[in-house]
Image (spheres, rainbow, N blue to C red):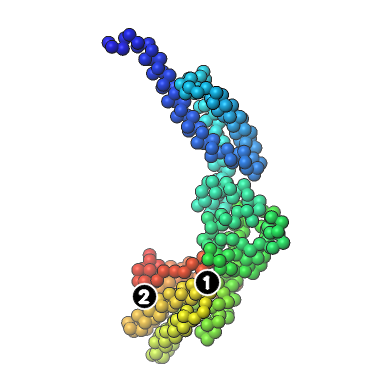
Amino acid sequence: KYIKVFEEQVNMWLCKLGTVEAVCTVWQSFQEKWMQLESIFIGSEDIRAQLPEDSKRFDLIDEDWRSLMSESCSIPNAVQVCNREGQLEKLEKMEEMLDLCQKALDEYLGTKRTAFPRFYFVAPADLLDILSKGSNPLDIQHHFSKCFDNLEKLEFDADEVSTGKAYKAHGMYSGEKEYVPFVEVFDASGQAVENYLQALVDHQCKTLKDILQEALTSYTNENRHKWQFNHCCQIVLVTTMIWWATDVTQAFNALEDGMETALKDQWTVQVDALKNLSVLVRGELSKGDRRKIVTLMTSDVHARDVVNRMVIKKTESAASFDWLAQLRLSWDDSLDNGSGDCLCDCCDARFLYGYEYVGNCGRLVITPLTDRCYIT
């Protein structure tokens, strides 16, 4: 009963303020979307070329948005701005058109992610930056860490780098600045970014596999002191694990043939190898080499402890669970059309080694819990 005197005026303000709230809500939502898409559709020639119709649609939206903002700036009263005739409907229509642009962009990014699945783990903003600059691999190197485990950059051809664009790479660097030369030159020219990144994945794996084959043939317990400095940390570790599993298996075979001290002799070999590494790590080493030796020592300590436990338990066969429960690496020459491949065995599970480059990042101490994690 108290509102009767000015009920009409109150209802008018309720309507106006309700419109202000509705307009501001749509306005804020539209502005956030526009800010995300403006740099993409206006600033990226690659996206405009790939999505011409949606780019034209965005140009119309952008023109209307700037015109609306310009007109709004000349009216200092928010109620008047928001209650202009057709203001809410115009903003809603613009937002609908903007949603169509966003949908088309998402579908475009989806095709790129399908072509190179590692893009699924890259933030949309970073992915758009990769796609917009992907015609020059030199410009997207700072994104490599988002697509690879530990590949920070490539060593491109110096003559090409001097021109500002580079496509041929001779090697790769990890985040720890460890350098691995490619066996064959990697060439990214004439390919879309998702295609040459997939080719780079395959190339790094092939490179590590070729280096592993060479390292396996040149490894002996006698020359290990020098050999370990000739290869990257990952190859040194994998080769050492392969030869350790091979030597222990041979020790079990000798044990079955009647050589009672075979397994203990293998433990002695492990102890001697650790002594050599402990002497080495106290000497003059570069930062990268020191980290490599410490990582190798961590792996060797675990190998020594495994053999020691089997000696104490008097394990007599390579078929015993104490041995089968270990993560065992081996090389099988019959795989991959006769070129050979590395296998990872644990209990009754068998996997092919992946050859993803992990650099010289060190590793945690291997504990009984780690062994149980391998099994599960």
Where is residue 156? Give x, y as percent. 66, 62
- Mark 2 — residue? 321
| Quarter placement of the C terminus | bottom left
Residue drawn 54% across and 84% down? Answer: 223
Where is residue 300? Give x, y as percent. 44, 78
Q: Amino acid at mark 1?
A: Gly
Helix, strand or loop at label 2? It is: helix
Q: Residue furthest left?
A: 1
- Mark 1 — residue? 288
Q: Quadrant of residue 64?
A: top right
**149 over 215 or under it: above or below:** above
| Quarter placement of the N terminus | top left
Where is residue 160? Give x, y as percent. 71, 59
Where is residue 82? Give x, y as percent. 48, 22
**246 over 17 or under it: above or below:** below
Residue drawn 57% across and 36% down? Answer: 101
